[in-house]
Amino acid sequence: MTEQPNQPDTPDQVPNGLAYALQWARLPPEHLQPVLKAIEPELKREHEFRMQQDAHKQELTLERERLDNAQRQLQAQLDHDERQAKRSHSLYLVGLIAGFLLSGGMLGGAIYVGIHDQPWLAALLAGPTLLALATLFVLRKNDRTLNAAAAQTVRTALNAAQQQQPAAPLPPVGGPVV
């Protein structure tokens, strides 16, 4: 008679085709042929299921890599934008400080030359030239009207300075030399 395969030892073990095949392996080969034909469809289904799982894992891995690359690119762009903003802020502060120092120096120079009887040079230092340079450094704007006014002031000051030259030489500062 034919020997029956053993039942599973525990109820939580669910036999599959491979388990039956292992149990039937003890039988002669002519009895094994129908068993192999019976478990072949189940093995094919398991193989297809594993192949689908592998394909799904590969898709997930590729998607994760794509998202990681996108995140790295976004982080690099954010870092670049932050560095650019810091540079821009530093440049703005340096321009503000340079404009303040230049304006203060020009006003101080205008006062100094104004006290020493050079009104046209004082007007040159404290007029539209001062406004044009302060606008250029502080506001970072190059206004054509201010530049034209500054150029006109410089021309006027130079013409006036040439007309005011004294006709006679000045007497020596000290007394007569003996």
Image (cartoon, rainbow, N blue to C red):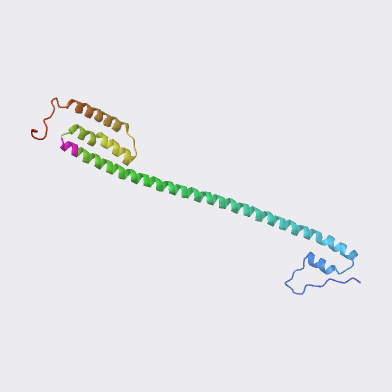
Is residue 46 shown above or below 6? above
- Segment colored magenta: 112-116
Is residue 91 shown above or below 48? above
Q: Find residue 21 and report its image quarter.
A: bottom right
Q: Nearer the viewer, residue 31 or 177?
A: 177
Q: Quadrant of the N terminus?
A: bottom right
Q: Is residue 1 magenta?
A: no
Residue at left offset 79%, top offset 58%: 41
Residue at left offset 23%, top offset 33%: 124
Image x and y of residue 116, in percent: 16, 36
Counting labels gives 0
Q: Residue furthest bottom?
A: 9
Is residue 164 shown above or below 12? above
Image x and y of residue 173, in percent: 11, 34
Q: Quadrant of the C terminus?
A: top left
Q: Nearer the viewer, residue 56 or 68?
A: 68
Q: Residue furthest right?
A: 1
Q: Find residue 42 and report its image quarter.
A: bottom right
Q: Nearer the viewer, residue 177 or 80?
A: 177
Image x and y of residue 50, in percent: 72, 58
Residue at left offset 27%, top offset 43%: 101
Q: Position of 9 compared to 55: left or right?
A: right
Q: Find residue 9 and report its image quarter.
A: bottom right
Q: Residue furthest front?
A: 178
Q: Position of 88 compared to 160: left or right?
A: right
Q: Position of 59 compared to 85: left or right?
A: right
Secondary structure predominantly adopted by residues drawn in magenta: helix
